[in-house]
Image: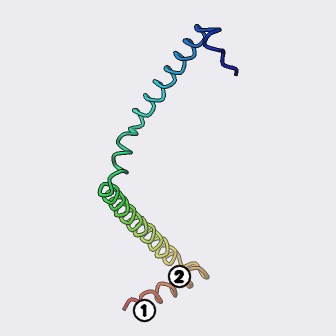
């Protein structure tokens, strides 16, 4: 797009400036809605960044631990259920596996 000379078309220049101002207002509104200022304030402060990362790390560790406990408990319940079914091959294998686990714990 070629820009007209200021001397040739002053109306076109005013129209372009209005369009650019409107676009800048839209960008400012978008940044305000995205809380860009809060993000900059939090990441410009080392202390806030450390606390934010520490809190996020603790939350992730706790979530992973609880998730692992739930999955292992469900697997143990499923294995004990399969042992009670007295399936010839699978039941014997699982019974040996559970006996091995009990021996290694105590």
Please tell me which residue lies in front, 6 or 50. 6
Q: Say what secondary structure mark 2 lies in.
A: helix
Q: In the image, which disc is placed on residue 29?
A: none
Please tell me which residue lies in front, 6 or 38. 6
Are there few (<14), some (14-19), or many (20+) residues within 10 Å of tag 2? some
Quarter of the image where one finds residue 60: bottom left
Quarter of the image where one finds residue 103: bottom left
Return the residue found at the far right: 1
Q: Is residue 93 above or below residue 48?
A: below
Q: Is residue 30 above or below residue 45?
A: above
Q: Residue at x 32, y 53 (%)?
A: 45
Please tell me which residue lies in front, 72 or 53. 53
The percent position of residue 51, horizontal first and vertical second, equals 30, 58
The percent position of residue 99, horizontal first and vertical second, equals 46, 88
Q: In the image, which disc is placed on residue 94?
A: 2
The percent position of residue 100, horizontal first and vertical second, equals 47, 89
The percent position of residue 95, horizontal first and vertical second, equals 50, 84
Q: Is residue 21 above or below residue 69?
A: above
Labels 1 and 2 touching (C-beta < 8 A): no
Nearest to the eye among marks 1 and 2: give it: 1
Q: Residue at x 43, y 34 (%)?
A: 31
Q: Could you tell me how far apart the alpha carbons at marks 1 and 2 are, in whole angstroms?
A: 14 Å
Horizontally, residue 18 falls left or right of residue 70, namely right
State the quadrant of the N terminus. Answer: top right
Are there few (<14), some (14-19), or many (20+) residues within 10 Å of tag 1? few
State the quadrant of the C terminus. Answer: bottom left
Sequence-first disc among 1 and 2: 2
Q: Residue at x 36, y 65 (%)?
A: 62
Q: Residue at x 52, y 23 (%)?
A: 23
Q: Is residue 81 above or below residue 11?
A: below
- What residue would you read off at disc 1? 103
């Amino acid at each position: 797009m070629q820009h007209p000379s200021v001397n040739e078309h002053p109306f076109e220049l005013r129209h372009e400036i209005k369009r650019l101002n409107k676009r800048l207002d839209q960008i400012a509104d978008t940044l305000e809605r995205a809380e860009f200022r809060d993000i900059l304030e939090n990441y410009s402060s080392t202390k806030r960044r450390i606390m934010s990362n520490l809190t996020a790390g603790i939350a992730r560790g706790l979530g992973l631990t609880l998730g692992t406990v739930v999955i292992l408990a469900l697997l143990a319940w499923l294995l004990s259920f399969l042992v009670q079914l007295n399936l010839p091959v699978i039941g014997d294998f699982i019974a040996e596996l559970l006996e091995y686990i009990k021996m290694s714990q105590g």
